[in-house]
Image: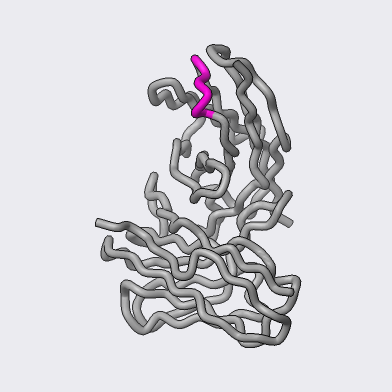
Amino acid sequence: NAGVTQTPKFRVLKTGQSMTLLCAQDMNHEYMYWYRQDPGMGLRLIHYSVGEGTTAKGEVPDGYNVSRLKKQNFLLGLESAAPSQTSVYFCASSPSGGSGSETQYFGPGTRLLVL
Amino acid sequence: GQNIDQPTEMTATEGAIVQINCTYQTSGFNGLFWYQQHAGEAPTFLSYNVLDGLEEKGRFSSFLSRSKGYSYLLLKELQMKDSASYLCAVRDSNYQLIWGAGTKLIIKP
């Protein structure tokens, strides 16, 4: 039971390049999330999904796209990377939308540097 | 707007007790979470409060006052491995988690 995994762990991009971050979970969770974490700031929600085939915008969606073609996978795409997207990206999942003490389970993170 | 405030950094001594405060102003309230995050790692769940009062879990306790928009995480018998960042998060009326910037806790021998 691997939990939540993310690929790659680290990447360096040049401005304007594109890339896709992959998140996979083996807990059969319905909800999946993409966050970014920057120094001095809390985790900020980029996009999330409430189930296979659905996606929704979070707090900071501009410059990112997502897809959830399979329940276990949630992809985050950067079409044209900018230095402002240098960050640590975390994927998380939860069984449902967060009732009671239900928590989110996080992947190990992807460190992205855009030059 | 929504806002969660925590101290940026705290220092404590091994074996001592430390209290990390969190104040919040959010659109609705559906629970407050504390997560631990070691440097370079993912956040992991520590505690959850939805009703006023103290929740105790081993060396860690978390307190909530909804009327004051206030919570604290209490860590007892500090160990070196407790050196980490502690994140406060509130679930708002849309059931989204709103996160504080985290408190970096440094434990000294």
Residue at 44% over, 74% down: A22
Residue at 50% over, 64% down: A9
**Rendered position, B82 above or below A113:** above
Frontmost residue, B86 versus A9: A9
Residue at 28% over, 64% down: A26
**Rendered position, A59 above or below B68:** below
Q: In the image, residue B68 lies at what x, y percent?
A: 66, 32
Q: In the image, residue A33 lies at what x, y percent?
A: 48, 66
Residue at 68% over, 37% down: B23
Check the picture and name the quadrant holding the N terminus of chain A.
bottom left
Check the picture and name the quadrant holding the C terminus of chain A.
bottom right
**Rendered position, B36 above or below B14:** below
Q: In the image, residue A98 lies at what x, y percent?
A: 41, 55
Frontmost residue, B38 versus A43: B38
Q: In this view, does A55 lie to the left or right of A85?
A: left
Q: Is residue A6 left or right of residue B87?
A: left
Q: Quadrant of residue A31?
A: bottom left
The colour scheme of the drawn protein is one colour
Q: In the image, residue B72 lies at what x, y percent?
A: 59, 29
**Rendered position, B85 above or below A97:** above
Q: Quadrant of residue A59?
A: bottom right
Q: Is residue B83 magenta?
A: no
Q: In which quarter of the image is residue B17?
A: top right
Frontmost residue, B32 versus B82: B82
Q: In this view, does B88 lie to the left or right of B79?
A: right
Question: Which residue appears farthest toward the left when viewing the image?
Answer: A1
Which residues are the magenta region?
Answer: B77-82
